[in-house]
Amino acid sequence: MTVTAFNDADLTRLETLLTPLSASGSTMRPDEVQGFFAALSSGPDQVDADFWLPEVLGDAPAFENPEDEAELAALLQKLYDSIRAALAAGEELDLILYAEEDSGEEGEPDYWPWANAYLYALDLVDTDWFEVAEEDEGFESLMMPMLVLGGAFEDEDGGEDLLTFTDEEIDGYKEELSDALAAVYNYWRAKEQAPVTMRRDGDKVGRNDQCPCGSGKKYKACCGAN
């Protein structure tokens, strides 16, 4: 299936429909939507619009115009599909980032909403990424740009942060974000394709032992011949 790229005109229309809803409430902004979708598209859980649409809309009021509601849903689906296709093709995402608050339109891009929404997706899916990857020592390293930029090490109650990072380190994680997204996506694809070790419940049957199926033949001449 060919996926049409999510273009600048689509983004402009998405901003027109979505941003006013996110101004006061829990509706996601377009940058948060992209981060959220990037995580959902990367992990092992298969989700669809019934899963992610309510999370994107949050407490948005009902649409007065059904056509706007349908158009917004279609744009979100297009964005979701384009992210999945880009990750699968190994293409770098064109990140949707807005200027930091109080820095003006030409200010530094704010990575926190994007990365925080990425981490939010991990709280919603059935699979606990870190539990499944517990034995893979490198997994947390792959996740560090998202964890650091998304505020995972910050104390939400205003206390001392779990870890602190220099401005140079944070800038480094910003530069590594795109590569990290690809690495995490590839990690889960490799995990899906890894062979599963089958373990016997009973004792091993020798080739010259009587076949456990009850045929009376030797195992090598019966079930062991297949």
Image: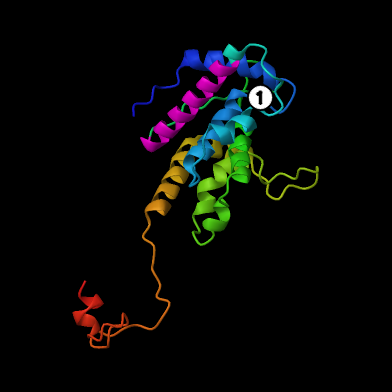
At label 1, counting other C-alpha atoms closer than 10 Å, the crowd grade (few under 14, some 14-19, many 20 or more) is some
Q: Kindly identify the residue that appears in the image at 32 percent across and 82 percent down.
A: 212
Kindly tell me whether residue 103 is visible in this rendering.
no
Q: Position of residue 160 (x, y in %)?
A: 77, 48
Amino acid at the residue labelled 1: Glu
Q: Which stretch appears magenta?
A: 69-90
**Which quadrant holds residue 111?**
top right
Residue drawn 75% across the image and 22% down it: 24
Query: In terms of image quadrants, where is residue 208?
Result: bottom left
Tell me residue 151's x, y (percent). 66, 41
Q: Is residue 165 visible?
A: yes
As drawn, the residue found furthest toward the right would be 158
| SS for callout 1 | loop
Question: Does the segment drawn in magenta span residue 128?
Answer: no
* Percent position of residue 26, x then y: 71, 28
Q: What secondary structure do most residues of the magenta stretch adopt?
A: helix
Direction from residue 87 to residue 99 in the image, left or right = right
The spot of residue 181 in percent (x, y) is 48, 39
Image: 54 above or below 201: above
**Of residues 31 and 199, the one drawn nearer to the viewer in this rendering:** 199
* Color style of the picture: rainbow
Q: Residue furthest front?
A: 215
| 163 or 136, nearer to the observer | 136
Q: Label 1: which residue?
A: 100
- Residue at x 54%, y 29% (from the top left corner): 34
Q: Nearer the viewer, residue 126 or 70?
A: 70
Rendered-image quadrant of the C terminus:
bottom left
**Magenta-colored stretch includes residue 71:** yes
Q: Quadrant of the N terminus?
A: top left
Position of residue 84 in the picture relative to residue 110 (left or right) = left
The structure residue drawn at horizontal position 66% and vertical position 44%, both measured from the top left corner, is 152
Identify which residue, 2 or 120, lies in the foreground. Answer: 2
